Amino acid sequence: MGKLVILKLGEGNFEQGFPVTLQIGDENVRPSVEITGALPPNPEIPRDYYRWQSIYRNLRLPSRPIGLPKELNQVSSLEDCQQVTEEFKVRFNAWLASDSFRPIREKWLEKLMLADNIRVLLQTKDFRLQKLPWHLWDLLERYPQAEIALSAPAYEQVNRIATTSDKVKILAILGNSQGIDTKADQALLNLLPNADITFLVEPQCQDLTDQLWEQHWQILFFAGHSSTQETNETGKISINQTESLTISQLKYALRKAVERGLQLAIFNSCDGLGLAREFADLHIPQIIVMREPVPDRVAQQFLKYFLEGFARGNSLYLAVREARERLQGLENQFPCATWLPVICQNPAEMPLNWGELSRNAPNIPTSLAKITPVKRITNRLGFSLLLLISMGMTGILTGVRYLGVLQPLELSAFDQLLRLRTAEKPDSRLLIVTVTEEDVQAQKQEKPQGSLSDKSLAQLLEKLQTYQPQVIGLDIYRDYPVDKDYPALAERMRKSDRFVAVCQLSDSQAGKPGVKPPPEVSPEGLGFSDIAIDSDNVVRRHLLALTPSPSSPCTASYALSVQLALRYLYAKGIQLQFTPDGAWQLGKVTFKPIEAHAGGYQGINAFGHQILLNYRSSGSPEAIAPHVTLQQVLTGKLNANAVKGKIVIIGTTAETFGDYWLTPYTTPQGKLQPIPGVFLQAQMVSQLLSAVLDGQPLLWTWPLWGEVIWVWGWSFLGGLLTAYLHRFTYLSLAGGIAITSLYGSCFIFLIAYSCWVPLIPAMLALGGNSLVAIIYLNIKFKVNNNGNLKYES
């Protein structure tokens, strides 16, 4: 969407200054920014302009004015005009760089990008301000797609009759042509596509008004002699060699024309600002006039350049800017040619586009193409062949993907997207108690059988229970009974419904016998610690439940993370239920298990009930929740508020016990980051709580048919770019933009919808289909010296 900038210059004068208001916003919506400033007093500005005007008007140029006075005793030279032009430009920009105007300039630079399509409206009723060449403002010149137009402070939108036809209706008035060539204007107009043009050559006033009254016109064009009477700031057009009319003398006919759909008036004639001021009262949407007397050749070249740009789809503003800037090539003969064209805009109307004027999309005719080298974009492959190649490429990639060939690349790309997500706060519902290497060494006198002795465990549980946690999970194996010296610990483990311990299921295929649970803990207080890992040993899946083998020493059906989450949610009135198809449901969330072929996974062992593990996004996966060490708890350095109502997970971080797992995250050295099992359990618990209580979406994938359509779409795009872009430079640029868009789309799907969208297959389809298309074209085409592909019969 383009940007609309409104620069309002209020009541004032050059002796006292002008208050200024700047508004910036998107087209067709209310401004989002408004700021005020001021232009300081500077009487030299109008004097400098009129000095330039005097020199310009006394040049011996073949122009289209009649009745403009010249000082016969003073003949200006091109050098004089060029010198005063540069002097005025410097002084004008110095005025616009004043301190009181600086807030306007700074806000413009802050809110507008160089690539923005910008329409600038200068609203003022001061005629001297309107006459100034505002296109010389260095800020406007910096923005290549910006153009300024004049507008009146008072305006309204006219309720026009909505009419459309197969061709654009144009009334072209060729007025008094004494000493000028209006036939060139007529020839250029005749080249317009989809145009129905009625020419009135030196008409009588009655003929002109009849045409305005009786037909629906969309564009009014005038070429001939015109002038502005500066005493009353009105304009005149010379319609024939004996009659000159002001706009007010055509007021009723023009008002009727506006009501019937007149949207643009072009006065390719001299000194037209007076005409524009009178037209403002009629509320016509857009007018193009010439600021000063215009040489015949300049008028013809501007019309040619403008029609070329406008008819090929440029907005009216960009077409005028391009045509105006192209006049610079004439300034060695006709100085200040780029100063002359001016747009006058009714702010209540949207800018015009040639394609909106008729029902038919415009095509540049051959005759107009001869005037300007418009390149026609052609499809060199054919639509059916494009479809066939893209479908073939999609089928090949789908088959290769199904065999698991792309799985390592897809998993790597998925990890990278996960790492790009914005950081989240730690989960305050959890507390992790770590048994560090130092804690293990401190317990040596207690002769522990593992990382945590009976004495330390008893003290730890006693401390935690006084702070009233919701549930405690012990992620440390205890396949031996509690020592008889600690009967209270055994009793607590046996009877507490807020304590969950772990065991490990046996796996005969992997040769794992399993690990028995603590003898004191009932089966209801057990959770298994088994983890589903990928072929690269990274944990990306969350194993919720499975059916233990009859020979397994561990009989837990639910994971430790599930047991902890269910107890926490139960206290909040949420219980585990099952849908008719057997899926889990907690609250409003359904946990559908992944299948062997899901997303980038192809042919994995989807045993039990697995879902994708959505790590809590942070700088490190160990930042999942607050954590304290064993010694900190035992020495009383733990705040009761950090425990009350929380899930406490106890586990070891001592490297000697080897309870470490690889994650999708990386270390500063770029290697995959391992984390202790207790932090991994916390990640899994947090995922369940966040999904049920916070509405955090679970990671999910499209069904196979959705992924196939996605891949095919990018494959088709690759062929399309190759078919239509004839230069390798353009194709490379477009390909780079397409790949960036693909990457960005996959990232947006992930962060906005938690959806794992195929990135690598789509990227291969985009590039592969483009490569196939290039190879095919190289068989039937050859490259010419300009780098274009040329058909070889």
Image: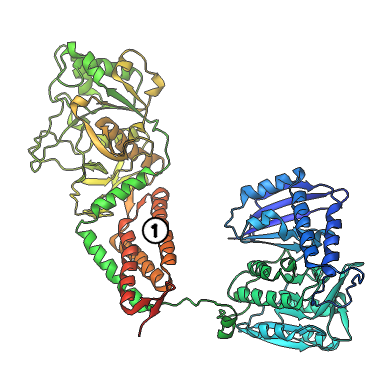
Instruction: Locate the C terminus and report the quarter of the image it occupies.
Output: bottom left
Residue occupying image coordinates x 87% and y 75%: 248
Nearest the eye: 260 or 570: 260
| Crowd around label 1: few <14 · some 14–19 · many ≥20 (10 Å) | some
Residue lying at 18% horizontally and 43% vertically, measured from the top left: 546
For residue 619, what is the image quadrant? Answer: top left
Which one is nearer the viewer's eye here, 365 or 743?
365
Q: Position of residue 604 (x, y in %)?
A: 19, 51
Q: Is residue 154 visible?
A: no
Q: Is residue 340 above or below residue 92?
A: below
SS assignment at label 1? helix
In this image, 732 relative to 286: left or right? left
Q: Nearer the viewer, residue 682 or 558?
A: 682
In this view of the protein, which residue sits in the foreground, 184 or 175?
A: 184
Q: Position of residue 99 (x, y in %)?
A: 75, 43
Q: Position of residue 395 (x, y in %)?
A: 26, 67
How many numbered tags mark residues here? 1
Is residue 509 positioned above or below 758 on the image? above
Residue at point 67%, 46% (across, down): 106
The residue that appears at 18% across and 13% down in the rendered structure is 444
Q: Height in image: 556 above or below 275? A: above
Question: What x and y, as percent, mark residue 30?
Answer: 66, 55
Which quadrant of the rendered structure holds the N terminus? bottom right
* Residue 714 falls left or right of residue 287: left
Q: How is the image coloured?
A: rainbow
What amino acid does circle 1 point to?
Ile
Quadrant of the rendered image containing residue 329:
bottom right
Is residue 322 visible in the rendered image? The answer is yes
Identify residue for label 1: 739
